[in-house]
Amino acid sequence: MLFTVIVKQEALEDTIAAYNYYEEKKPGLGELFLDTLKNQYIQLAEQPAVNSFIAEDPHQLLRDVRIKRFPYVVVYEIIEKDVIIYAVHNTYKHPQNKLRKA
């Protein structure tokens, strides 16, 4: 069963900021980031429950998964048949701030 991936506005803003940062560093690197993130979203649509819960907040059912090759995690929650993406969090810049949930 495929889940529907829903990207919240905050996660979209995170993604745009990351894309712009990587494109400034090296042209094409932002595109590689987007491709890698897209593949992660596809994996989440197929098997969202394989990733662990975020231990810092036992009262919420938030999970995160590391994006390959980049210092980012996708913070999400499974609600029925939807995967809600709350953040695309930079673990290097803001290691403690990944639980921002709208």
Image (cartoon, rainbow, N blue to C red):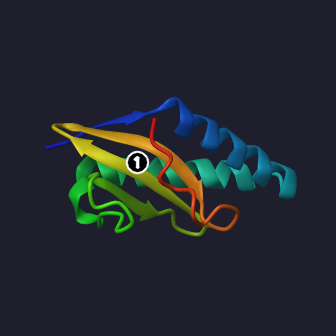
Task: Tell me where residue 94 appears, x and y as whole percent.
Answer: 65, 61
Task: Tell me where residue 93 appears, x and y as whole percent.
Answer: 70, 63
Task: Tell me where residue 4 appears, x and y as whole percent.
Answer: 28, 35
Residue at the far top in the pictured view: 9
User: Which residue occupies 61% across, 43% down?
Assistant: 15
User: Which residue occupies 47% across, 53% down?
Assistant: 99
Q: Which residue is mark 1?
A: 41
State the residue in front, 70 or 8.
8
* Local crowd size for mark 1, using a 10 Å CA cut-off: few (<14), some (14–19), many (≥20): many
Disc 1 secondary structure class? helix
Figure check: 62 above or below 68: above
What's under tag 1, amino acid-wise?
A: Tyr
Left or right of 27, for residue 73: left
User: Which residue occupies 85% across, 58% down?
Assistant: 25
Instruction: Identify the image quadrant of residue 70.
Output: bottom right
Q: Quadrant of the N terminus?
A: top left
Left or right of 100, for residue 51: left
Task: Tell me where residue 73 appears, x and y as whole percent.
Answer: 50, 60
State the residue in front, 26 or 91.
91
